[in-house]
Image (cartoon, rainbow, N blue to C red):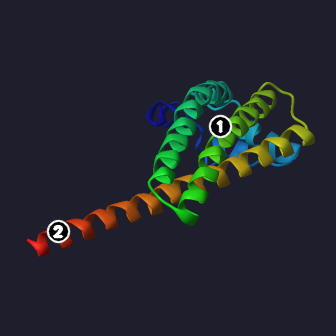
Amino acid sequence: MMIIVAQTGATLKTPATPLGILNLEFAYTAEKAFAVILAWTGLIPADNVFAAIINTWLDFIFLLFYALFLYQASTMLAIRHTGLLSTVGNFLSKGSLAAGILDVFENIGMLLTLNGHISNPVSLLTFLFSIVKWILAIAAVLYILLAGSSLLYKKVIRTALRNLSK
């Protein structure tokens, strides 16, 4: 899904919108959202507003995959740890599901904007949903890297100690 979303959103990266769809996610005012839409309107050969709509609908599928993956990975690592790493993992597993739900609301806001319903409240809410989603998702990824590395390190040490005792 990451590849498909990246391919369908490739034309959204323009000189005025170098981050592509993220420029719309982070447009926290109607003025900024309108500037993104304007940058995507009338580009030949691509209709980037239509491409953004398709990309946003595809994100509904992608969010299911990433939210469940982050939830499952965080949960599995939390079970294998104790103390703080376990507590953080359990929190971030739930945070991963919350990130998926926030992504749904973010997508709804972007679809409203892309369909001409540009307003300050919609832009601000879309931005806030996006920021919190990104914080939760990045925190979960960092936790998975840290807790996974910790498990790998412990396994390497145990194996080395076993080999030394032979």
User: What number of labels is visible?
Assistant: 2
The reply to whether residue 44 is visible in this rendering is no
Looking at the figure, which quarter contains the C terminus? Answer: bottom left
Mark sitting on residue 162: 2
Q: Give the mark toward the camera: 2 or 1.
A: 2
Which of 78/111 is in front?
78
**Between discs 2 and 1, the one toward the N terminus:** 1
Within 10 angstroms of label 2, few (less than 14), some, or many (20 or more) residues? few
Q: Is mark 2 on a helix, strand or loop?
A: helix
Which residue shows up at 54% across the image and 36% down it?
68
Q: Which of 3 and 90 is in front in this view?
A: 90
Q: Which residue is drawn at 76% across and 29% down?
A: 108
Q: Which amino acid does label 1 sit on?
A: Gly
Question: Going 73% across and 50% down the picture, which residue do you hit?
Answer: 132
How far across and down, in percent of the image, does residue 67 sit?
Answer: 57, 38
Residue holding disc 1: 100
The three-letter code of the residue at mark 2 reads Arg
Task: Point out residue 158 in the picture as x, y percentages from the top left corner.
Answer: 25, 67
